[in-house]
Each structure stands twice: as C-alpha cells, then as structure tokens.
Image (cartoon, rainbow, N blue to C red):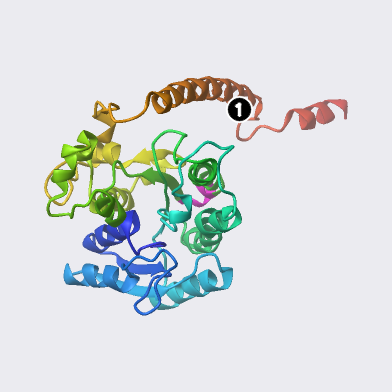
Amino acid sequence: MGGATRGAGRGIARALGEAGAVVYCTGRSVRGNPSPYGRPETIEETAELIAAAGGTAIAVRVDHTIESEVAALLERIDREQGRLDILVNAIAGEDPLMGQWGSFWQVDLANADTIFRQSLISHIITVKHAARLLMRARRGLIVEVTENDILSAGGNPIAQAVKLSVKGLALQIASELKPHNVTAVAVTPGFLRSESMLQHHRVTETNWRDAGKQDKNFLESESPLFVGRAVAALAQDENVIRHSGRLLSSWELSREYKFTDYDGRRPDWGRLAIDFSGLPPSLINLFRDGTELTLNWLNDVTKRTRQFRAKIPKPGRPARSARKSAKKR
C-alpha cells in the first residue's frame, strides 16, 4: 500500500487488512521523522489501526521517488510472503504543493519538478517493480488512486496534469498487463473526509455533519474506509480483469458490490445534485466551458480510436503489408 500514511491511502490499507490481506504500509512519515507535509500521521499508526481491528500490517518507510528503495521493498515482500497480490498507489495524493488554486498564467512553478517527481514519477517507479511479481504469478491487481471520475481534477495546471496522468497510467499499463492476466485500474473517492479535509472544515470524524451547515455537499462525503472497501471488493473479485483500464469510483463500485461505509451509509457522489451556490459565477462558467470542450475532445478521440482499431489485424491474421508480400511471391 504505497502512501498509507493518511487519507485514501490509510483507508484502503485498513480495508485491505479488514479483508484479510497482509498489508505493507509504506510512506515517508514515521515516528520521529515526519514527511515535509508537517502533519502528525505516520505509517506506524496506520499499521496499528489495522492490527487493532484484527488484521496484519507491516510498516516500512519507503521514499517512492527513490527507485532503489522501491526495489528493496518489493524484494522484501517477495522474500517474506512469496507473492504480491495487489499494489495500490496513493502516493502523494494530498501533497500540499499541489494545493494552490489559480489559472495557468498565475501558477507558481517553483516546486513543479518536485511535484511531478513525488506525485507521478513515484507511481511509475512503483508499478515498474511491482508488475514483475504480478506478471510472474499471472494474476493480481494494480490500483492507481486519483481524483474525480472525469478527466478534470485539481485547481491548477500542475495538479491537473498529475491527476490526469495517473488516470492515463492505469489505462496504459492495463494494455501491457492484459496478456499476463493482471488488472490495472484507476479509482477515485467521492468527497473524501480525509484528516486534512476535516481539519479544513474544523470538525472531527465524530461531528463531521456539522460542516454540512456551511457546505451541503459535505453531507454526501465519505470516510477513507469507503474507498478502501471499494478497492478491497475489486481485489476479491475473481473476474476483476473485466474492469481493467477503467476509471472507477467508490460510489459506482458500492452500487455493484453492495458494501457500505463504516457507519452503514452508502454515500453516492455521482447521484448528488451538487450545490454550486457557494461558488463564484466565473468558476461555474469554467466548469461549464471545460466540460463542453472535454466532451468535444472525447468525441473526436473516440471516433479516431475506433477508426484506428478497425485497421488493426484481427488475431491470427497477418498484417496487410505481409499479405501483399505473400501475393507477390
């Protein structure tokens, strides 16, 4: 579980432990040596939460931007467990460096290289080494945790590029992994009640509904365990490969697999009539224009993709140029 320190990563780690998996909780934040985020959560706490619920977890400090550390982690898992069943990448999903809001012509690029290294390259490094164990076993699941179930996400072009790339990464590797019977998907939570989000709204997990007085949408929010149970449901599906390459959401998976949040609720962000009343008209117009342009873009890409696919030789048939050469001989 890459990025198990907090947020969706911690929730997914807990749900996998709840489902009976041996969970390796990785990240940079450990007791006495927190990450630069300046937050109190640690991977040891995540492992302890899993153990307290009756599960098995092992906390391992790993900087996923350093390839040698990732390689050592996978070698250790192989040595100790003999196999890898699932990799979840939630690394740097809430990196505060991505938190700025603004137009692309206003964005602060001082930390752009660092953001891409921490929030995207780290994912590529990790899937590179994990895929080898999954391919060897000819089974398994890779989950890329992202934001939003459409193309757009993030409040600035750097965050948008990262979140979109993570979705695309799942799609790309799914194609390469299909012959090896390994599944890769991207999964997004809904309105996530992460530790930082609760802090932002000045509430706790005990009284989180109080924040709904200022933001009605927050009443449809989900705990990190909800998206965790979505991933756990995928991991236990013997036919999960039918989902490979797709961008999935916690609420859609809840409809399919019938799991609930820890309180018995089944939050469904997709069916919510979103309250936009607190947003400035300029931002609402941006959403409207952006979705229209996205639909045009997707329509064009869909048409071209179908045209290209029709040109690809069917299995067992030689390529067109090869058939022409055979006729000449």
Which structural element holds mark 1? helix
What main secondary structure does the magenta stretch of the protein show?
helix
Depth order, front residue of 282/242: 282
Give the residue displayed 12% in from the left and 51% down from the top. Answer: 207
Indicate the position of residue 90 as horizontal and vertical percent values.
Answer: 41, 56
Depth order, front residue of 114/248: 114
Give the residue displayed 55% in from the left and 61% down from the top. Answer: 125
List the single residue furthest toward the bottom. 32
Q: Is residue 93 magenta?
A: no
Quadrant of the snapshot with the N terminus: bottom left
The type of residue carrying mark 1 is: Arg
Quadrant of the snapshot with the C terminus: top right
Q: Is residue 9 left or right of residue 217?
A: right
Question: How many C-alpha atoms fall within 10 Å of the one at disc 1: few (<14), some, or many (≥20)?
Answer: few
Q: Is residue 258 left or right of residue 106?
A: left
> Vertically, is 119 above or below 30?
above
Indicate the position of residue 195 as horizontal and vertical percent values.
Answer: 28, 57
Residue that carries the numbered disc 1 in the rendered image? 309
Indicate the position of residue 102 as horizontal and vertical percent values.
Answer: 49, 39
The quarter of the picture where residue 258 lies is top left
Magenta stretch in the rendered image: 177-182
Indicate the position of residue 10 as horizontal and vertical percent values.
Answer: 30, 60
Number of marks: 1
